[in-house]
Image (cartoon, rainbow, N blue to C red):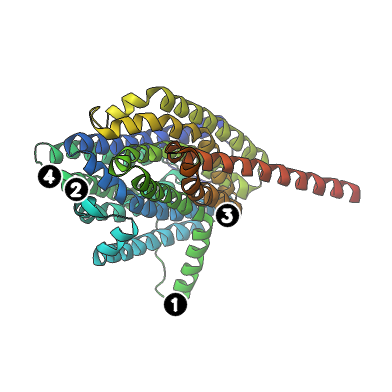
């Protein structure tokens, strides 16, 4: 039987308690991640000003991209390893996990080299220019190590949860967040280190999180030990093949993070064009809040993933369906609650980032209620994409992610401002999410009819 540290049995424990046992530690860990992001934003907004917020927002797509690569490898390794474990092939699961870690470290080093050798080209791609270039470059140079550490940490959390230790994964989120929050205050206020201090605090927090992951893999793991791989060409070729498959399975995770980066970058350009620097500062608050909601929705998908993947590998369809139903319900509740919070509490939320006497305050308070109208659709979309990914239906998962995060989104930013004015800037993300939900419903209806037709043909043949 699959043994693990927290005595979690993915194949036999009742779905409700099993999901809750993974979801609440995962959610709590991500809540502290939210606290880390919000603390960073609040301290920078009040201690450095709107320019500091805008500089961090311009760099955020880099963090989304690298975190997405970590999610891609982590989800891919977790799905593949879970299926191996469901069939009793522990050695194969360990090999896949080890190969994922090696790939993550190699990719991190490569990105670091490119990032430091060509900073001007990177900032140019992000649309950094004018008065924001100098502070953005300062933050970028100090912040880049965080992104490299983040890939290993993100990958490791997937493996730790699959190994049966969601509580340890929670602590690997909470402790770095606390350290980052404390150091943010110390470096920005008493030390007066500005954006360099904000970035350095994040670096240190990320380092602690990564060290916790590596400590777990070296000394605490019970089932998914790292495996000593052979240093031969055959082993290298098989490793590249396995990593390639994990990348395909986990690709929607990367595409999802790229979609967040596109949302930030496209929004920054659109707000800069239509509203100016103050519009970018206002939009930066939405960009701080969006990943927080995205994390909560991802907590649902990531909690359901090992349950779905394990039971899919074991051929237990009823447990897969129950997990999907529960995760959709939880996602729907989260989406409604967040939408209501944006509708009624936007002025108080904005005050946490900006003083009421700056122009960006009025822009943000007027726009956030529109912006928050799409979170129900986003929650459902992420849940469905995570479910398809857990079943290795990567093609459909990637298509839906591309629609919500790039195709519909870029089109909305391009068209809506001309049709309805600046309100269209705030409605672009909700519009993209709602259209994607509609496409998903059509997809489900078509697939349902196809399955029903195939069943009738089989019944007639029998």
Indicate the position of residue 366 as horizontal and vertical percent values.
Answer: 38, 29
User: Pointer 4: residues within 10 angstroms few (<14), some, or many (20+)?
Assistant: some
Look at the picture and state if 26 lies above or below 146: above
- Badge 3: residue crowd in 10 Å (few <14, some 14–19, many ≥20): some
Q: Is residue 448 left or right of residue 178?
A: right
Q: Nearer the viewer, mark 4 or mark 2?
A: 4
Which circle, 4 or 1, is nearer the viewer?
4
Question: What separation in Å lies between label 2 and label 1 (alpha carbons)?
Answer: 40 Å
Tell me how far mark 4 sits from mark 3, CA to CA.
45 Å
Residue beneath disc 1: 233
Task: Confirm whether residue 242 shows in the render.
Answer: yes
Q: Which residue is mark 2?
A: 200
**Mark toward the start of the polypeptide (3 vs 1):** 1
Mark 2–mark 1 CB contact (< 8 Å): no
- Which residue carries the number 3 mark? 394
| Label drawn at residue 193 | 4
Q: Position of residue 105 (x, y in %)?
A: 34, 61
Among numbered discs 4 and 3, the one appearing first in the sequence: 4
Cα–Cα gap, marks 4 and 2: 9 Å
- Marks 4 and 1, how far apart at CA: 49 Å
Residue appearing at x 41%, y 67% in the figure: 229
């Amino acid at each position: 039987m699959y043994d693990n540290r927290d005595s979690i049995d993915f194949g036999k424990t009742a779905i409700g308690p099993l999901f809750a046992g993974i979801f609440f530690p995962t959610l709590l860990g991500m809540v502290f991640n939210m606290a880390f992001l919000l603390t960073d934003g609040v301290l920078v907004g009040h201690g450095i000003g709107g320019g500091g917020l805008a500089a961090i927002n311009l760099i955020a797509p880099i963090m989304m991209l690298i975190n997405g690569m970590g999610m891609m490898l982590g989800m891919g390794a977790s799905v593949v390893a879970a299926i191996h474990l469901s069939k009793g092939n522990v050695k194969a699961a360990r090999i896949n996990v080890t190969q994922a870690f090696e790939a993550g470290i190699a990719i991190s080093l490569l990105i670091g080299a490119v990032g430091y050798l060509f900073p001007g080209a990177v900032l140019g791609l992000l649309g950094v220019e004018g008065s924001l270039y100098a502070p953005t470059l300062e933050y970028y140079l100090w912040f880049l190590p965080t992104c490299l550490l983040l890939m290993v940490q993100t990958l490791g959390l997937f493996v730790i949860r699959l190994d049966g230790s969601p509580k340890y994964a929670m602590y690997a989120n909470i402790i770095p967040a606390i350290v980052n929050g404390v150091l943010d205050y110390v470096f920005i206020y008493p030390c007066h280190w500005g954006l360099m201090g904000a970035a350095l605090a994040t670096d240190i927090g990320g380092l602690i999180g990564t060290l916790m992951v590596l400590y777990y893999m070296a000394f605490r793991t019970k089932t998914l030990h790292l495996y000593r791989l052979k240093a031969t060409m055959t082993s290298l070729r098989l490793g590249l093949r396995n990593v390639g498959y994990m990348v395909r399975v986990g690709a929607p995770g990367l595409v999802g993070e790229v979609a967040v980066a596109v949302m930030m970058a496209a929004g920054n350009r659109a707000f800069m064009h239509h509203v100016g620097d103050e519009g970018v500062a206002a939009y930066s608050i939405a960009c701080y809040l969006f990943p927080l909601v995205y994390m909560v929705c991802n907590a649902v998908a990531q909690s359901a993933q090992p349950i779905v993947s394990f039971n899919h590998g074991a051929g237990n369809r009823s447990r897969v369906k129950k997990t999907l139903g529960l995760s959709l319900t939880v996602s729907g509740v989260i989406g409604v609650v967040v939408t209501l919070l944006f509708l009624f509490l936007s002025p108080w939320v904005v005050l946490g980032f900006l003083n009421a006497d700056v122009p960006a305050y009025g822009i943000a308070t007027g726009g956030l209620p529109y912006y928050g109208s799409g979170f129900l659709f986003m929650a459902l979309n992420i849940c469905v994409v995570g479910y398809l990914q857990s079943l290795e239906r990567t093609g459909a998962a990637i298509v839906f992610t591309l629609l919500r995060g790039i195709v519909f989104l870029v089109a909305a930013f391009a068209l809506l401002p001309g049709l309805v004015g600046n309100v269209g800037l705030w409605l672009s993300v909700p519009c993209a999410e709602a259209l994607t939900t509609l496409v998903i419903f059509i997809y489900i209806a078509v697939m349902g009819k196809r399955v029903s037709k195939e069943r009738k043909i089989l019944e007639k043949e029998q």
